[in-house]
Image (cartoon, rainbow, N blue to C red):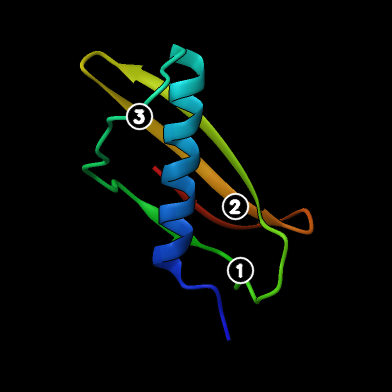
């Protein structure tokens, strides 16, 4: 069994949304993710792994861009923009 890539991207996107809401002091998130510009999968994630998600949010005027990566045991597993 492997942790599916679509769930990895969803996890990274939600981490970015939460980070954005925290930075903007928003109490209720009313944001829609619209694009996945690029995603890469370097190493497989096998359950039950502990996944660390690292995200950064860039303000892009009317929207924002999330750059994130997932790391398991100090090994980069996936990244997306």
Report helix, strand or loop for mark 1.
loop
In three-dimensional space, the C-alpha distance between marks 1 and 3, rounded to whole angstroms, equals: 31 Å
Nearer to the camera, 1 or 40 = 1
**Residue 51 screen position, x and y as percent:** 67, 57
State which mark lies toward you, 1 or 3: 3
Residue shown at the point (56%, 80%) measured from the top left: 2
Residue shown at the point (44%, 23%) measured from the top left: 21
Ranked by sequence position, the earlier of labels 1 and 3 is 3
Report helix, strand or loop for mark 2.
strand
Residue that carries the numbered disc 1 in the rendered image: 43
Q: Are marks 1 and 3 in contact (CB under 8 Å)?
A: no
Residue that carries the numbered disc 2 in the rendered image: 70
Q: Image quadrant for the C terminus?
A: top left
User: Could you classify mark 1 by the number of other residues whose Cα lies within 10 Å: few (under 14), some (14-19), or many (20 or more)?
Assistant: few
Report helix, strand or loop for mark 3.
loop
**Residue 59 screen position, x and y as percent:** 35, 17
User: Could you classify mark 2 by the number of other residues whose Cα lies within 10 Å: few (under 14), some (14-19), or many (20 or more)?
Assistant: many
**Residue 40 screen position, x and y as percent:** 45, 58
Vertical placement of residue 20 versus 78, above or below:
above
Residue sitting at the far front: 27
User: Position of 38 compared to 52: left or right?
Assistant: left
């Amino acid at each position: 069994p492997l942790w599916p890539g679509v769930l990895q991207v969803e996890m990274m996107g939600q981490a970015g949304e939460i980070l954005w809401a925290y930075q903007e002091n928003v109490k209720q998130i009313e944001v829609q993710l619209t694009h996945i510009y690029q995603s890469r999968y370097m190493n497989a994630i096998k359950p039950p792994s502990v996944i660390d998600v690292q995200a950064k949010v860039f303000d892009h005027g009317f929207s924002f861009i999330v750059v994130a990566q997932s790391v398991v045991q100090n090994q980069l597993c996936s990244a997306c923009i």
